[in-house]
Image: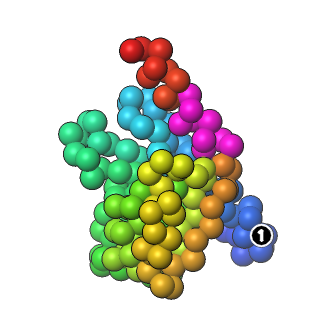
Amino acid sequence: MSFYNFEENQNPAAEDEHYMRLALNEAKKAYDADEIPIGAIVVCKGKIIGKGHNLTEQLNDVTAHAEMQAFTAAAQTLGGKYLKDCTLYVTIEPCIMCAGASYWTQISRIVYGANEEKRGFTKVNQNILHPKTLLKGGVLSVECGALMTLFFQNKRKQS
């Protein structure tokens, strides 16, 4: 796991970009494995306590989204199912399943990169998050969206 000290910096935008770049590294692992390139990192008090990328094809499991992998790893690290005082960084806006799972974790904050126009939870119901969860979108959205665009362009060429 990783530690990055922002106490001296006091720049939340820089912190969000730093962790989103690490989530992008996870997304690139998914891309390289021919999975939809979404990556996620869970951070608690400056430490990465969970990370994941899509594994739906590899595991033959429609629930094996990046966020679910990161939530499971974070809960195992903490030794409990609640992720209070934690932030989820995910490269693409969560789907309704992952947003619902975030509700049950009681995660404090979700930061995502690019919007998901077709399957993003905000299109269905923005109120699915836990009432205390803060939401921030658009962090490194161009980079996050570009990886998805490239992935699907390549898929169309292969068909």
Percent x, y of residue 117: 54, 49
Q: Quadrant of residue 25?
A: top right
Label 1: few (<14), some (14–19) or many (≥20) C-alpha neighbours in 10 Å: few
Percent x, y of residue 23: 54, 51
Residue 144: say if magenta: yes
Count the labels in the image. Answer: 1
Q: The residue tagged with tag 1: helix, strand or loop?
A: loop
Percent x, y of residue 69: 34, 55
> As displayed, is residue 39 above or below residue 5?
above
* Residue at screen point 63% across, 61% down: 137
Percent x, y of residue 5: 67, 68
> As displayed, is residue 137 above or below residue 86?
above
**143 vs 131, nearest the viewer:** 131
Look at the image and give the residue range highlighted in magenta: 142-150
* Residue at screen point 60% across, 50% down: 114
Residue 92: say if magenta: no
* Residue at screen point 26% across, 36% down: 58
Give the quarter of the figure containing the C terminus. Answer: top left
* Residue at screen point 26% across, 47% down: 62
Q: Is residue 64 left or right of residue 12?
A: left
| Residue to which mark 1 is pinned | 11
Q: Quadrant of residue 59?
A: top left
| Amino acid type at mark 1 | Asn
Assign the magenta stretch its main secondary structure: helix
